[in-house]
Amino acid sequence: MAMWIEVKARYDRMLENGTTKRVTEPYLVDALSCTEAEARVIEELTPFTNGDLSVTSASKTKIVEVFLQFSGDRFYKVKVNFITLDEKTAVEKKTASYIIVPADNLEDALHRFKEGMRGTMSDYEIEAVTETKYVDLYTMMRRDSDSKEEMLERAEKDPAIMRHVNRFRNACAAGGFESVTISSSDGKTVHTATLEMPLKDNKPKTNDNG
C-alpha cells in the first residue's frame, strides 16, 4: 500500500547571484517504500542539479491525504481530529490525522482545507495548521510492470477516493443500490473499475470494466 514518505536530498543549489550553496531540502513522495521514494527524488532532481546529489534520509510520515485538487507556493500540514462516539460508553473518541494542503498562505490553507472537507459526514475539529518546509511533492507514477489489478487496488485504498465514495454512499437513499466508477490513466491508457454499493452495511464490490 502506498504511503507518503519524507525524503531529504542534499545538493548544490544555484543562487540568484550566480553562486552555489550546498543545501538539504525535504520532499514528500507517494511511494510503496522508502527505497522507491529515494529513487524517485533522485530521478526528479538529477536533471536540475550539478555536482553531487545524495539522499540523507527517508522516513514514513503520518500524512493520510494530500489535497491534490489545489495548488500553491507552499505546503501546509493540517492536524485534524475526527470525532466518533462509542455507542456502548457514550464517550467521544478523537483520532488525529494529518492532511497536506497546497496554498499560498495560512488563511488560504485553512479555507482550502474546509473546502476539501465539504460534504464529509464525519465530525472533526482542526487542532493545528502549520507551514511545512517541503519544496515539492511527487505522486506515485505508474510503472510498466504494474498490472491493471494493482493500479485499481491502489486506487480503491486511496484515502481521498474512499472518502468521496463514503460521501456518495451516505447520500444514497436507504436501501438503494448505486455505483461509482474509478478511472486510472498513465497518460496513454485509461483503466476503469466500478464499485457497486448496496447500502445494507455491505462492503463495496469491484466490477472490472477494463
Image (cartoon, rainbow, N blue to C red):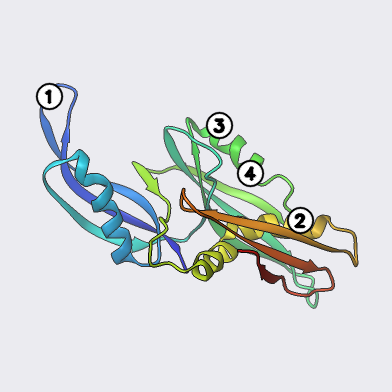
Q: Where is mark 3, residue-wise?
A: 107
User: Rounded to the nearest whole Å, what is the CA distance between mark 4 and mark 1?
Assistant: 41 Å
Q: Which amino acid does label 1 sit on?
A: Gly
Residue 166 place in picture, x, y as percent: 72, 60
User: Rounded to the nearest whole Å, what is the CA distance between mark 3 and mark 2?
Assistant: 29 Å
Q: Is mark 1 on a helix, strand or loop?
A: loop
Kindly report which numbered mark, 3 or 4, lies closer to the viewer in this rendering: 4
Nearer to me, 186 or 205: 186
User: Rounded to the nearest whole Å, what is the CA distance between mark 2 and mark 4?
Assistant: 15 Å
Q: What element carries label 3?
A: helix
Q: Which comes sooner in the sequence, label 3 or label 1?
A: 1
Q: Where is mark 2, residue-wise?
A: 168
Of the numbered discs in the image, which one, if any, rests on residue 116? Answer: 4
Q: What residue type is labelled 4?
A: Gly
Give the side of residue 26 with respect to residue 117, left or right: left
Nearer to me, 157 or 120: 157
Q: Where is mark 1, residue-wise?
A: 18
Kindly report which numbered mark, 3 or 1, lies closer to the viewer in this rendering: 1
Nearer to me, 132 or 139: 139
Q: What element carries label 4?
A: helix
Q: What residue type is labelled 3?
A: Glu
Q: What element carries label 2?
A: helix
Q: Which comes sooner in the sequence, label 2 or label 1?
A: 1
